[in-house]
Each structure stands twice: as structure tokens, then as C-alpha cells.
Amino acid sequence: MATCPECDAEIEIDEFDVDKGDQLSCPDCGSNLEVTNLSPLEIELAEEVEDDNSEEEEDAEEEEEEESDED
């Protein structure tokens, strides 16, 4: 059993079914969580990781906005 750091909901996790670094989501609030310790079982909010594609898309959008501002 672990507690969601975002909403304090009790989350039933079998410590033998997870490994350190595993990601899961809170069934109550949907937060992305990461297993940070196995004994005792601890979970923390997972860092948001943007994939490279979305970063490139954002850069392209910013360039388009800059070009339209110049006109």
C-alpha cells in the first residue's frame, strides 16, 4: 500500500510486482507516479518528460508566430 503524493489516496501496489523506476498512475487523480523505493514502498510524482517530436513542433509553432509578427 502506498499513498499518492498528489491527492493522498491509498494505492494498492504489490511491492513484488514493481521495480524501482516503474511508472504508474493514481486511480483517483490520474497523476503520473514513479516507484522511488521498494522497501519501504515509496512513490513520488513522475517528472514530465516531453518527447523530442513535441519539442520540435513547439519550436516550429514559435517560428511561425515570429514570422507573422514581422508582417
Image (spheres, rainbow, N blue to C red):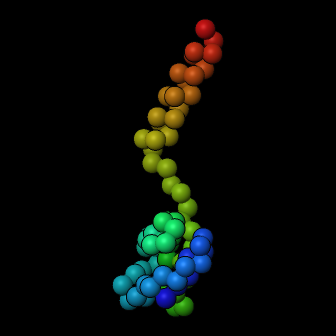
Q: Position of residue 21 (x, y in %)?
A: 47, 73
Write down the quadrant of residue 69 in the picture: top right
Residue nearer the viewer, 32 or 50? 32
Q: Quadrant of the C terminus?
A: top right
Please identify the residue farthest to the left as the structure is shown.
17
Q: Position of residue 64 (x, y in %)?
A: 53, 21
Please identify the residue farthest to the top as the structure is shown.
71
In the rendered structure, the answer to whether residue 13 lies left or right of residue 71 reads left
Q: Is residue 66 above or below residue 55?
A: above
Q: Is residue 24 above or below residue 1?
A: above
Q: Tell me which residue sits at (46%, 78%) in the image.
A: 20
Q: Is residue 47 above or below residue 2?
A: above
In the rendered structure, the answer to whether residue 70 lies left or right of residue 64 reads right
Count of marks, rendered view: 0
Residue nearer the viewer, 8 or 57? 8
Please identify the residue farthest to the right as the structure is shown.
70
In the rendered structure, the answer to whether residue 64 lies left or right of residue 19 reads right
Q: Tell me which residue sits at (57%, 16%) in the image.
A: 67
Residue nearer the viewer, 69 or 7? 7
Q: Tell me which residue sits at (45%, 72%) in the image.
A: 27
